[in-house]
Image (spheres, rainbow, N blue to C red):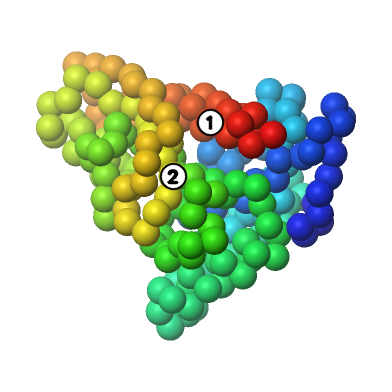
Amino acid sequence: MSRGRERRHGGGGKVFRIAVMISGAGTSLQNLIDRIRDGRLPGVEICVVISSRASVEGVRRAEAAGMPVDVIRVKDLPDVDRFSDHITLTLDAYMPDLVVQAGWLCYWKLPHRWMGKVINIHPALLPKFGGKGMFGRHVHDAVLAAGETESGATVHWVDNEYDHGKVIAQRKCPVVAGDTPETLGERVMAVERELLPDVIAEIRRQRG
């Protein structure tokens, strides 16, 4: 998977190249890898994986799939500006058609030239239960504490505020009596596994 080169897939169309940004186990990354491999997400290629942590399962998943991995850690850099610059340099080198934040937990400053090219998946129905610190179990704890009867997942465009950009798509799932953060999280993850690939496929279709 070479940097910045246009490729064609088996059907003759241009390969839609995505970068995936992760911070943890990489379950959403693995879902995308599996769907690309088995043909459920045709014409898509992961050209690079950016991880904010070095020793996480997501990095091992990417390496096992033979994908380039760039580990960019906040603690290795003096401030958010330098952190953001390093991310942008990687994106500029690989020039993906779309950047997918899938379990990415770090704030970075998105430059204007990448606006409208970065999406994020969030484990709740935004604008509820979004913002700084709202990720993973924290989200599901908040949903249950609020007495919500439904939850779900949201894919939205990324801007320079937490969980703030325009919503692209949402899917819902019920909150069931007796739910724990773990059981609700499993149900939301099942929604995410379908929603994120569907959104990527639709963006690819729209952009030709």
Nearer-the-camera pick, 165 or 30: 165
Instruction: Please say if 94 is above or below 25.
Output: below
Q: Position of residue 108 (x, y in %)?
A: 43, 64
Mark 1 and mark 2 in contact? Answer it, CB < 8 Å: no
Which of the labelled discs sits on residue 199, or is there none? Answer: 1
Residue shown at 25% from the left, 29% from the top: 180
Nearer-the-camera pick, 160 or 131: 160
Query: Label 2 belongs to which residue?
Result: 157
Query: In whole angstroms, how far apart are the C-alphas of marks 1 and 2?
Result: 11 Å
Mark 2 residue crowding within 10 angstroms, few (<14) / some (14–19) / many (20+):
many
Name the side, left or right, on which 1 lies relative to 90: right
Which of the labelled discs sits on residue 170, or is there none? Answer: none
- Residue 30: quarter of image: top right
Q: Position of residue 115 (x, y in %)?
A: 49, 54
Instruction: Please say if 11 is above or below 68.
Output: above
Q: Position of residue 31 (x, y in %)?
A: 59, 33
Look at the image and tell me whether residue 2 can be seen.
yes
- Residue 160: quarter of image: bottom left
Q: Name which residue type carries label 2.
A: Trp
The C terminus: image quadrant: top right
Q: Position of residue 169 (x, y in %)?
A: 42, 29
- Residue 37: quarter of image: top right
Disc on the earlier residue, 1 or 2? 2
Name the secondary structure under disc 1: helix
Residue shown at 36% from the left, 46% from the top: 165
Name the side, left or right, on which 85 lies relative to 185: right
